[in-house]
Structures are given as structure tokens and as C-alpha cells.
Amino acid sequence: MARWEPDAEGRLIKAAFVLFDERGYDDTTVTDIAEAAGLTKRTFFRYFTDKREVLFQGSRELQDRWLEGIADAPPDAPPMAAVAAGLTGVLALFADRHPFARMRSRIIGANPELQERELIKLQTLAGAIQDALVDRGVPRSSAILAAQTGVTVFHVAFAHWIGQDDPSAFERLVEDTIAELRVVIAPARTVSRAGRAS
């Protein structure tokens, strides 16, 4: 009966996040999650391979959106412009997910195993972006650099986003992070012997 109720996946995700946040990830079982959602353990495994995957189930959608944005970028777009086009497409995914994103970050931050899985997710994303750029004719070394930079911008802006209270600020924070990156990588000015910067 309950397993056929609407939005079973969403209910399982919500229940898992609340339990992970209240009890801790390690002290929450699949049975706990299923019961809190009013569903069966069997139903849980129809959607997720294990409880960890509840926290990472959006990774595929994020990657697909980013790659779609890259594919839609003009053929002559520079590598970073193509990466930025993909990132713009990703931002819409987070429009109404601020509370869950903040909770998820708190859960992952409290568990080394989950932190490792998060790093693997980001590296997998960077690898997919890199391959998409190579397919567009970008030299591999440039593709690696652009992909890693794009994922780092996303990661830094995301951390700023969940650390503040405006759910609509993500796009602005991405732009701020890109502006900060430009400052960081600006060529150093040389200093003459007279002590003047040139």
C-alpha cells in the first residue's frame, strides 16, 4: 500500500535528511528512514542502493545540466565561456533548495566518509566537463584547466551561498567568485629597483 503513494522518493529524501541532521548519519538506518517516510525498506531500495546515495542522488542531474549548457554554447566559445554557460544552466537547479543544501552540507561536514564521497563527486564532474570540452576540440591540458577551474568556482560559490540567508543569491555569488578569481590570477606587477610598481 504505502509504497505506491505519490512522491515516495521525495519523502524518503526528506526523511533521511531530517534524521541524518538530528541523529547523525552513522546512527540512522535505512529502516529508520523508510519508517519515518511511511514506506517500506523494500521501497527505499527501489530508489537508492544505500543510505549514502540519498545525499548524492542529485549528482547525475547536476552533471547532465552542466554538460547540456556546454553543448549549447557557441562552437567558437572559448573553453571558460563554455564552462560558464554550463554553470549558468546548473544554477536553476538550486533555486528552491537552499534549506536542503544547507542541511546536506552540515551532514556531510560531520562525516569524513561523506566528505570523501563529495570530493569524488566533484572530481567526477570535472572529468565529465573536461571530456565535453575535448569533444569540442579544446586541447586536453586546456580542458583540464577550464574544467577544474569551473568546478572550483562552483564549489566556492556554493559554500558562500549556503553560508548566507538569501536563497536567490547563488548567481550573484558565482559572479563574485569569478571576479575574485580574476584578481587572484592577475599578472603580478614587477617592482623596479626604485621601489615603484610597473
Image (cartoon, grey):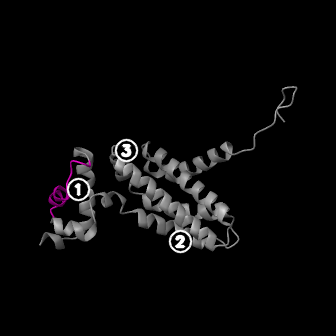
Residue 170 rendering spot, x and y as whole percentages: 49, 51
Which of the 4 image quarters holds residue 24?
Answer: top left
Which numbered dot is residue 130? none
Label 3 is placed on what type of residue? Gly
Q: Earlier in the sequence, mark 2 or mark 1?
A: 1
Q: Earlier in the sequence, mark 3 or mark 1?
A: 1
Label 2 is placed on what type of residue? Glu
Magenta residues?
Answer: 25-39
| Left or right of residue 198, residue 37 in this image | left
Magenta run includes residue 72: no
Which numbered dot is residue 15? 1
Which of the 4 image quarters holds residue 151?
Answer: bottom right
Residue denoted by label 3: 109
Q: Residues within 10 Å of mark 3 (few under 14, many from 20)?
A: few
Q: Could you say whether the residue bearing mark 1 is in a helix, strand or loop?
A: helix
Q: Residues within 10 Å of mark 2 (few under 14, many from 20)?
A: some
From what the image shows, is residue 198 above or below residue 124?
A: above
Magenta run includes residue 30: yes
Q: At 33% from the left edge and 57% from the top edge, which residue is drawn?
A: 55
Q: Could you say whether the residue bearing mark 3 is in a helix, strand or loop?
A: helix
Count all numbered tags in the image, as a single digit.
Answer: 3
Label 1 is placed on what type of residue? Ala
Q: In the picture, which quadrant includes the C terminus?
A: top right
Q: Earlier in the sequence, mark 2 or mark 3?
A: 2
Q: In the depicted view, which residue is nearer to us: 11 or 33?
A: 33
Q: Could you say whether the residue bearing mark 2 is in a helix, strand or loop?
A: helix
Q: At 50% from the left edge and 58% from the top edge, which residue is drawn?
A: 123
Q: In the picture, which quadrant includes the N terminus?
A: bottom left
Residue denoted by label 2: 68
Q: Are marks 2 and 3 in contact (CB under 8 Å)?
A: no
Q: At 66% from the left edge and 72% from the top edge, which residue is drawn?
A: 74
